[in-house]
Image (tube, helix red, strand yellow):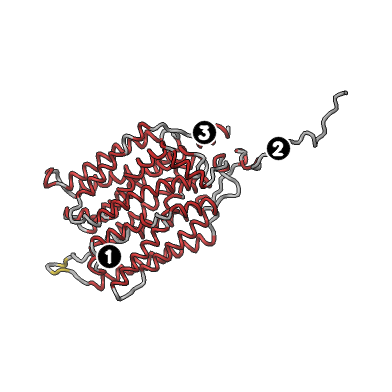
Amino acid sequence: MGAVESTEGEREPLLVPSQPATNTQPGLSRVYGRRWFVLTMFSLLGFMQGLVWNTWGPIQISAKHVFEFSSTDIAVLVMWGPVGYLPWLLFMWLMDKKGLRASLLLSAFFMVLGAALRSVPLKDLYYRRWMIHGGQLLNGLAGPTIMSAGPLLSTTWFAPDQRATATAIASLIGYLGSACAFLIGPLAVPAPNGTVGSTVYWNQNHIRDRIQFVLYAEVGMIAALFVAVLFYFPSRPPVPPSVAAASQRLSYRSSICRLLSNMRFLMVALAYSVPTGVIAGWAGVLDMILTPAKVSQVDAGWIGFWSIVGGCVFGVAMARFADYIRGMLKLILVLMFAGASLAATWFTLTCLTRLTHLPSTTATLYTSCILVGIFINSSVPIFLELFIETVYPVPEGITCGVVTFLSNLFTGLLLFCLTFYFTELSWLNWCLTGSSTFTLPPPPSYKQTNDRLYLDVFVSV
């Protein structure tokens, strides 16, 4: 019984891996230049979704006179955004099973249909109001994909050292659209309380025409984006950009069960959803909040614009910083919400100048409101990256779908209360202050994990 050399066939493994080796070899990972085009198309859709959602709040005085809206109607128009989030489980399932392209096309179709419905120039104001409400609801149905798919896109297309930056751009551009609504609305649509000399300027037909022009422009831009996504928007690149992007993820049902049973995740999800949900509803009716302080529609628009733009710019900068100091997301969030609590308290007390005797000037309102927007809105991409690291290997789209649903739930609750208590609005400012302070205790007691980061950094080495 002498030893005989084994043949080539005998040296073949009996058990082959379930996934091809090329899917997990970090040496074969690759990033594509087209990733920036994909990110741009997604971000522009998010921009338009935020712009349409925030159409009516900044011009609520003009809309009330032209379409005979009440304060309750304005609150409900803003509330259709969170209401559109109710079927979020269906959109998360579609994203998980069919990919980002299919879910984004469906969302873009809802946006086109909703924008077109709002712009139908009916003479009967009763039916016209119903068409506007229906259009806002259809735009809200695009929210689950637009607001939660940013981290999925960044993981699918971007390298680990660019993921936080891509997540920030994809998730904050929608906020920038809301900010531009503060700018475009008051500048394009004149307020009925303007004066020329000693004569009150009042031309209802002119105001209606300007609103109609804004609605037509929005439907044209959304239709162009829908056609662009229809012709080219791949769900994923030919070769994944990292080990984490190529790794196997949990199934849809297993992911939902793991998220709902993970107390650490739920604790931080509340810390995210309460302040971001409250500030979204608060910003949507900012003009109503500032009207008692004798702030004009145009000035209120500029304050809202710069508060959100500041949050977007600072958020992208902090996300880029986080790409270089990965693993310190918790500390960044604690510092952000400490600043948000102080700024929100300052803004609230400034609006109560008759009781606090604090100077209520345009400068103080601008400064305090912009600081609130910077600290809270810029925390969004940092939170999303923290969630994904916490519950990995749950798919990014499902994780962010759950937390953005919770955020929209709190936005909807705030606006629902506004439909009953709209005569005195200082309670909205106290809700903003309380929500910012609410976030401070959970993150320090939360132990950060970096499972996805470990996979990319150590396994690839």
Is residue 184 visible to us here? no
Give the spatial CA distance, label 2 vs label 3. Answer: 27 Å
Q: Nearer the viewer, mark 3 or mark 1?
A: 3
Give the residue type that dot 3 points to. Answer: Tyr
Residue 345, position as x, y percentages in the image: 22, 41
Along the viewing direction, whichever of 64 and 268 lies nearer the viewer: 268
- Where does the N terminus fall, quadrant-wise? top right
Disc 2 vs disc 3: Cβ atoms closer than 8 Å? no
Give the residue at mark 3.
454
Label 2 crowd bin: few (<14), some (14–19), many (20+), radius 10 Å: few
Q: In which quarter of the image is residue 27?
A: top right
Disc 3 vs disc 1: Cβ atoms closer than 8 Å? no
Is residue 189 visible to us here? yes
Give the residue at mark 2.
15
Give the spatial CA distance, label 2 vs label 1. Answer: 69 Å
Tell me the number on the disc at residue 189: 1
Residue 40, position as x, y percentages in the image: 47, 53
- Where does the C terminus fall, quadrant-wise? top right
Tell me if residue 274 comes above or below residue 65 in the rendering.
Answer: above
Instruction: Identify the element where label 2 is drawn.
Output: loop
